[in-house]
Amino acid sequence: MALNFSAFGVLPAGLAVTPTPFTLNVPNRDVHNLYSLVDSAYIAAPKYYNIHAYAPNGTFGVSRDWLIDSQKYWIDDFDWREEEAQQNKYPQWRLNVTAPSDGQVYDLHFAGLFSKKADAIPVTFLHGWPGSWLEFVGVLDLLAAKYTPETLPYHVVVPSIPDYCLSTRVEESETELDMDQASEALNELMIALGFDAYVAQGGDVGSFLAQTMCGNHDECKAYHLNMYFLTETQKESVANANLTITPAEEAILQGATAWASTGSAYANEHGTRPSTISLVLNTNPLAMLAWMGEKFIEWSDNVNATPLSLKTILNTVSLYWFTDTYVRAMWSYRVLTSIVGGTLPTMPTSFTKPFGYSAFPVEIASLPRTWAEHLFPNMVFYNAHAQGGHFAALQEPAAFLEDIEEFLEIVRPNVTSSSP
């Protein structure tokens, strides 16, 4: 049965500024150019160093065979217009918001499902890199199938986070965005939609944004994460507490340690040489696919869960290409990896507002339950999953949504909305 997403596209009444409905329509010349560049892309001849016969698990990144197969699929089987039409099923808008702190104007894109219930809880889902708002389309599908606008218990807002894909700044300045600025813009988006109280959810870069929104802004009443990097102080606290963890949690921690030593080079490149890497990757979509596709594969659960399809990966890579977003998307890594080998900056995390966490086994950072209980006196929800990875909403939307719905019911008394 076809889902009626348009029925969920009625914005809350009484908005001071009405968002502009948005439909993605990439110009034909850009679509043709992408296919032409992919078709003409040069792939190096087979060598000992790119066939990876001695590293079947992708230890050294994507293989030549994978890239050749992906190139062929992209040209012969991937239909951008079909994917674009699928994206346009979801109600989407653009809205300019002005950050109070510095007056910057953001042209923000967001998808949404809006409820007609007076007590609906506003919740925003925040993606990261190399993801996009498309990470949450499976969640939107499940919600639209489960509820009607009259029964939906939530107002769901899924933005393209600032400087990623479809969200830009009206006048790009020489200043680089940081987490405080980006979270301020997203908070202003929620306020502009009539929500004086809401919940933030995030993974990857979105996890830092959700923490910052809840730490800095009164309107954000609770936050849920599916990735968390401990600060140095928290690491010392956990070590001194001599906490026990399960064998499964120990395996996840070992994976996170391996990522830190062998899988984080991309982040250091993003953070310290963003101009070089963005220029290199913008020479050809296939180069971008190799760089981004490696992460979609490596950070997903390819053993216990269904691996992400190549079509799913190409959908997001194409969106990055068409929006020329790569150079803009580097801001988060400039902030987070300004010193190679250094510590992550401390986020303005709330330890009083309700906090929830979902642990998926294939993750680049981990927060075992006993650690979470020790570090977060405000933790009201924790669930550990047997399958799923870094892109939890994309790979395991049903399990992800089940967690979110349980968390939202727990925090419902803490969240009141000014919207009808």
Image: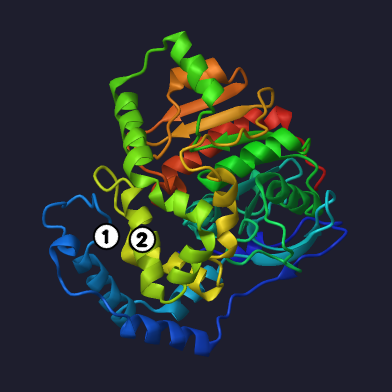
Residue marked by disc 2: 293
Is residue 398 shown left or right of residue 43?
right
Near mark 2 (Cα within 10 A), the count class, few <14, some 14-19 or many ≥20, is many
Is residue 341 shown left or right of residue 331?
left
- Structural distance between the alpha carbons of marks 1 and 2: 8 Å
Q: Nearer the viewer, mark 1 or mark 2?
A: 1
Residue drawn at point x = 59 percent, y = 41 percent? 208
Marks 1 and 2 in Cβ contact (< 8 Å): yes
Tag shown at residue 62: 1
Residue drawn at point x = 37 percent, y = 54 percent? 295
Residue 341 versus residue 91: which sits nearer the camera? 341
Number of on-image labels: 2
Residue 81 versus residue 167: which sits nearer the camera? 167
Is residue 114 shown left or right of residue 386?
right
Dot 2 falls on a residue whose secondary structure is: helix
* Residue 20 x %, y %: 75, 70
Is residue 61 positioned above or below 179 on the image?
A: below
Tag shown at residue 5: none
Tell me which amino acid carries mark 1.
Answer: Val
Q: Is residue 145 visible?
A: no
